Image (cartoon, rainbow, N blue to C red):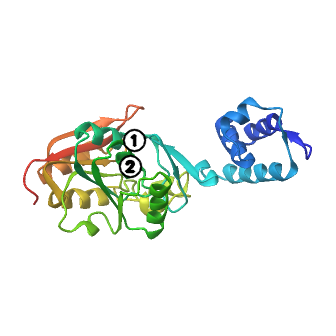
Amino acid sequence: MSPNTTVGACLVEGMRRLGSVLDAELLLAHSLGVDRARVKSHPETAVDAERLASFRTVLERRAAGEPVAYIVGHREFWTLRLAVSPAVLIPRPETELLVERALALRDAGPARAADLGTGSGAVALALAHERPAWEVTATDASTDALAVARANAAALRLDRVEFLEGDWFGPLAGRTFDVVVSNPPYIAADDPALTGALRFEPRAALAGGADGLDSVRRIVEDAPRHLAAGGWLLLEHGATQAADVAALLVARGFAHVRSHTDLAGHERMTEGRWDRESA
């Protein structure tokens, strides 16, 4: 390929290298500083040597397995564009189910919501965006993750979301909520995906002990002390863990326990209501 080539030729090279039209388009748009629509609609545009070199560099990073979101520095979630870095888990479409269910369980009136292990702030910020009357608090044990979440809140002008450093309910002593949501680690520690496809993402946000449910157990055990009567706990989990998570909720005394499927038909989140006073 010549030093002064075209967008179309770059796309062909990218597709051949990666086997993915979408990845090639996203990475070329990133390298050129334009949106994907312009890349698709102007294949005749010339690409100079500097931008061509940049594109080839990111192609190699993607070919080595690095996620596109980390390369371009952002990911779409719900209706929001979120900055991401290797300090946070990349928000995924299935996690939008947490947002959908939280919105379905509480109306637009005043409510208190907590997002445990917020990472990039994806769920907390989506809830704050959709429910301006809600008081939304988010926790995370990672200082670096909270820096990303706070930057996202500022960029989206959702500064009223409160971010607190600490493990799960740790920073929330004495506080109760109407809705608690969490996408905790739920992958078994010996799962090969942790050293394979997921190796670029923070292990602490993925690995959940021998069976993947260590963090889920902690959250379920502590949640009643932080839920108002009638408050809901919503947990994302793996596609084969719904029955185990539901059993944990029932054993702890939650009512109306039920699981919900994602767009692929997998049971990816389970919810339960706490019908007593905080305990």
Q: Residue at x 44, y 70 (%)?
A: 143
Q: Residue at x 86, y 47 (%)?
A: 48
Circle on res. 123: 2
Label 1: which residue? 96
Q: Amino acid at mark 2?
A: Val
Q: Is residue 3 visible?
A: yes
Q: Position of residue 226 (x, y in %)?
A: 18, 59
Whole-Å distance between the Cαs marked 2 and 1?
Answer: 7 Å
When the figure is inspected, residue 213 is found, relative to residue 104, above or below; the finding is: below
Mark 1, residues whose alpha carbon is within 10 Å: few (<14), some, or many (≥20)?
some
Instruction: Mark 2 or mark 1: name the one nearer the start of the chain.
Output: 1
Q: Which one is in front, 258 or 82? A: 82
Quadrant of residue 41 within the rendered picture: top right
Q: Amino acid at mark 1?
A: Glu
Asked if residue 37 lies left or right of residue 136, the reply is right
Position of the C terminus, as image quadrant, is bottom left
Quadrant of residue 220 within the rendered picture: bottom left
- Count the numbered circles shown: 2
Position of the N terminus, as image quadrant, is top right
Asked if residue 35 lies left or right of residue 200, the reply is right
Q: Are marks 2 and 1 in contact (CB under 8 Å)?
A: no
Q: Which one is in front, 109 or 75? A: 109
Q: Which one is in front, 78 or 243? A: 78
Q: Which one is in front, 259 or 10? A: 10
Mark 2, residues whose alpha carbon is within 10 Å: few (<14), some, or many (≥20)?
many
Report the residue that reaches farthest toward the left: 276
